[in-house]
């Protein structure tokens, strides 16, 4: 029998929606309901606990429950933390988490317990919310004994209060939610344990029936099943005490539990260095210390006193701690564990303690890393140890920027932007082969369209923001998915969104094809110069993005959609191509300008022109050389260097790729353990995954591995070794892996290429093409002198 969340629940929900709505209105009928704490405000800040005790006659082999909450929940089963969720979405696509909790259960008395919180107006911008609510439904009649309703007990936790991030510590846009202030004297210690006495708690109040997306009812949340795995929760230890005042921690502190006391009436400050950036739940264990105040402050880096410039991230002398923080007020109890509702980002953590009349014992400090459970499958080796370091640093960057969605940066925003996500998704595909988070991102972006408008610049987002160019990069992301993932049905489902985005832009095109003024925020990151205002027509970057989008859409429509529309897109692309060449091509410099006045030239614009096919193949390598070597041309930031590297590859100049990695070398020299947002010392964010593009370009350019057909059903291997004499590695493929081993010996390139069963392709070296068959291929090709 299927429940509301079961595989056939869509049809059931649509058929029964009127009856369920009547049950909602009258508060009658069986089954799970959304619940809240009686008399608690629906849309204000609050932290709440829920419990359900039940009996089982035997330990089950499986026990599946579907769980959701607004804003968030942590679920405990018999005192053990079992899950955190739900995966982020929007009100029309509110996620529920199917959880098999059998391993935590036993015969006899069992307890489910959850903490649910609502950050209300202080919620992260990435967190959509309607009102406080909690939902559990068993997946079968036997499991529905735990359905949420009046048989659950609940209470509001008055120990919690929010801590807004102090504006003086903000460097730019900060929207990840408040810190936690917890008064231990008000906290219901042991609330999640089976033996806790909840007799004074109130029965939960039903606030509505669950409804799936598409149900003919008015509900706060339309439910869809979680489409990604649960986040990883991995205990971690380590780091170093860099300095302390008022107390000297033992040498073993951080490596293991090593208790030490802070005397009464003492102020102590301990600076902890994780040695690399992390995203984790901190866990501080203390005893005693009634009347004390403990503050945990987090930062990516230390900053020079009175200055923004952090300098070398490994250096702390003359620097101070600036960052968001949490505060814990001990109650004198033993073994009190303080953690946070949401995870924190830090390399440096400052632990400040001010004791009252009692000493405080620090029993332990540890953390639990969290992130999307990517598994690194790609491998690379060469005669450059530097490239291995760049890959490892980029992998850490990508991991810290992937959770229930991709995030632009884990410290400041935690928002999933189209522009960032396209790059992050390619990193995921090349390094892990796991496309689930990419698919989730494409769906969330597609669902952000309202009426006849384009996709939002980011999703989920409680604040509406449009970056028109990012809607075009979303089309590129759909096309990337089509090329690298064998899932044509999903791509076909996204084509209406592609059409809607292009129709919006078509209305802005002027006679001749070029775009007129484009509203909203025209942020493209092509250079450090100011972007145009909404009343300024004629800007090459957005025209070129539209040209690429028409080309991508034509490819997908011709295969999966409407061939007639594909032809229309090709005609639009041809017209726009002519307009771009007429307006922006400077014949004297043989480069494309950013605007019709031909005053500013950038590597970014010329990269897009190469990628869009506006430069003849015979001229492309020389064109790439001009844009790289002209000292007067504007260089892009780290984000847009993905398009620069892609263009250099496409132009046949990939031998120059390794020489273009100087910005990453500078970041390593500055002690960064992840890649920064911008190529400058005082970058706002020290962890921005749009800068990790070398983590696929090394495989796509040096090893030369790329998809040559939709679904990765054919493979192109076109390597560029540059100054290297050997390189080898592999990337995951939908049918296995693609492995390449390259070595230059005596003027000959020796190559071994292994392809999965049923997959063929081509090997291209310095213009010479050889066929590749499934399985192992051995080739020897003469190597001419490579132009630099």
Image (cartoon, rainbow, N blue to C red):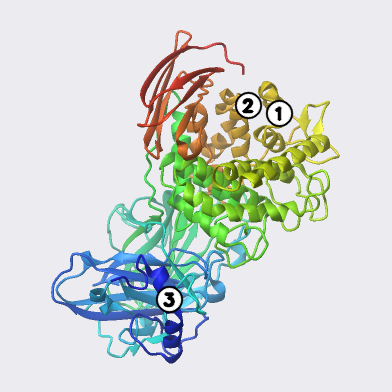
Q: Residue furthest top?
A: 746
Q: Secondary structure at mark 3?
A: helix
Depicted 4 relative to depicted 302: above or below: below
Q: Please report the residue visible at 50 percent of the width from the left and 24 percent of the height from the top.
A: 719
Real-space Cα separation, disc 1 to disc 3, in angstroms = 57 Å
Depicted 758 relative to depicted 36: above or below: above
Q: Which of 486/677 is in front?
A: 486
- Answer whether residue 31 is visible to the viewer in this image: yes
Sequence order check, earlier mark of 1 and 3: 3
Q: Residue furthest front?
A: 564
Real-space Cα separation, disc 3 to disc 2, in angstroms = 57 Å
Q: Look at mark 2 in the image and give the residue it sits on.
A: 651
Few, some or many residues within 10 Å of mark 2 (<14, 14–19, 20+): many
Query: Answer yes or no: do the residues labelled 2 and 1 have beta carbons within 8 Å?
Result: yes
**Nearer mark to the viewer, of 3 and 2:** 3
Residue 462, percent from left and from top:
58, 68
Give me the disc on residue 15. 3
Q: Residue furthest right?
A: 597
Q: Look at mark 1 in the image and give the residue it sits on.
A: 615
Q: Secondary structure at mark 1?
A: loop
Residue 475, percent from left and from top:
60, 48
Q: Secondary structure at mark 2?
A: loop
């Amino acid at each position: 029998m299927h429940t509301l969340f079961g595989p056939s629940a869509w049809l059931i929900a649509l058929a029964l929606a009127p009856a369920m709505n009547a049950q909602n209105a009258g508060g009658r009928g069986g089954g799970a309901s959304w619940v809240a704490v009686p008399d608690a405000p629906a849309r204000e800040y609050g932290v709440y606990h829920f419990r359900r005790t039940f009996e089982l006659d035997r330990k089950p082999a499986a026990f599946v429950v579907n769980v959701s909450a607004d804003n968030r929940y942590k679920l405990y089963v018999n005192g053990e933390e079992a899950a955190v969720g739900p995966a982020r979405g929007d009100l029309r696509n509110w996620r529920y988490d199917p959880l098999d909790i059998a391993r935590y259960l036993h015969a006899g008395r069992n307890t489910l317990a959850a903490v649910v919180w609502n950050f209300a107006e202080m919620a992260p911008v990435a967190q959509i919310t309607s009102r406080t609510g909690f939902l559990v439904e068993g997946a079968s009649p036997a499991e529905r004994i735990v359905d949420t309703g009046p048989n659950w007990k609940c209470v509001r936790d008055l120990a919690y209060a929010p801590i807004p991030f102090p504006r003086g510590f903000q460097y730019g846009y900060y929207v990840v939610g408040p810190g936690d202030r917890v008064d231990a004297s008000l906290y219901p210690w042991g609330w999640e344990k089976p033996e806790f006495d909840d007799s004074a708690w109130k029965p939960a109040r039903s606030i509505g029936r669950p409804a799936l997306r598409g149900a003919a009812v008015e509900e706060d949340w339309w439910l869809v099943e979680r489409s990604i795995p649960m986040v990883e929760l991995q205990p971690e230890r380590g780091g170093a005490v860099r300095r302390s005042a008022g107390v000297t921690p033992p040498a073993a502190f951080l490596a293991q539990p090593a208790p030490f006391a802070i005397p009464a009436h003492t102020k102590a400050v301990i600076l902890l260095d994780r040695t690399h950036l992390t995203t984790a739940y901190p866990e501080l264990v203390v005893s005693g210390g009634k009347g004390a105040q403990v503050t945990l402050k987090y930062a990516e880096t230390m900053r020079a006193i009175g200055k923004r410039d952090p300098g070398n991230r490994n250096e702390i002398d003359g620097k101070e701690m600036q960052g968001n923080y949490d505060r814990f007020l001990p109650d004198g109890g033993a073994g009190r564990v303080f953690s946070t509702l949401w995870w924190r980002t830090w390399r440096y953590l400052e632990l400040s303690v001010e004791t009252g009349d009692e000493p405080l014992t620090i029993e332990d400090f540890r953390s639990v890393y969290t992130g999307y459970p990517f598994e690194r499958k790609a491998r690379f080796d060469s005669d450059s140890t530097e490239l291995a370091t760049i890959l490892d640093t980029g992998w850490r960057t990508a991991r810290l920027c992937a959770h229930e969605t991709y995030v632009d940066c884990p410290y400041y925003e935690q928002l999933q932007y189209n522009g960032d996500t396209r790059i992050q998704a390619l990193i995921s595909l090349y390094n892990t082969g796991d496309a689930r988070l990419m698919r989730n991102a494409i769906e969330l972006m597609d669902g952000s369209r309202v009426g006849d408008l384009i996709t939002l610049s980011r999703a989920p987002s409680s604040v509406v923001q449009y970056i028109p160019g990012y809607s075009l990069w979303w089309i590129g992301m759909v096309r990337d998915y089509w090329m690298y993932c064998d899932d044509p049905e999903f791509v076909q489902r996204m084509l209406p969104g592609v059409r809607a985005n292009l129709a919006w832009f078509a209305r802005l095109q002027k006679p001749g094809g070029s775009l007129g003024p484009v509203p909203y925020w025209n942020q493209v990151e092509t250079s450090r110069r100011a972007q145009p205002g909404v009343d300024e027509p004629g800007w090459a970057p957005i025209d070129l993005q539209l040209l690429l989008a028409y080309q991508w859409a034509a490819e997908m429509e011709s295969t999966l959609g409407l061939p007639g529309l594909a032809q229309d897109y090709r005609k639009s692309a041809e017209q726009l191509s002519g307009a771009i060449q007429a307006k922006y091509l400077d014949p004297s410099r043989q480069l494309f300008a950013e605007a019709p006045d031909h005053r500013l030239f950038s590597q970014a614009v010329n990269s897009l022109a190469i990628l869009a096919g506006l430069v003849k193949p015979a001229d492309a390598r020389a064109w790439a050389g001009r844009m790289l070597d002209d000292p007067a041309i504007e260089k892009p930031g780290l984000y847009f260097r993905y398009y620069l590297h892609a263009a250099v590859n496409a132009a046949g100049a990939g031998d120059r790729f390794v020489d273009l990695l100087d910005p990453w070398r500078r970041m390593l020299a500055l002690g960064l353990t992840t890649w920064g947002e911008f190529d400058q010392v005082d970058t706002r964010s020290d962890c921005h995954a749009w800068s990790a593009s070398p983590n696929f370009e090394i495989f796509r350019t040096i090893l030369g591995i790329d998809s040559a057909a939709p679904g990765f059903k054919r493979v192109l291997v076109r390597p560029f070794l540059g100054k290297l004499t050997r390189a080898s590695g592999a990337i995951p493929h939908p049918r296995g892996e693609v492995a390449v081993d390259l070595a230059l010996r005596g003027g000959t390139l020796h190559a071994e290429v292994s392809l999965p069963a049923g997959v063929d392709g081509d090997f291209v070296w310095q213009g010479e093409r050889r066929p590749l068959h499934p399985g192992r291929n051995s080739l020897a090709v003469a190597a001419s002198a490579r132009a630099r």
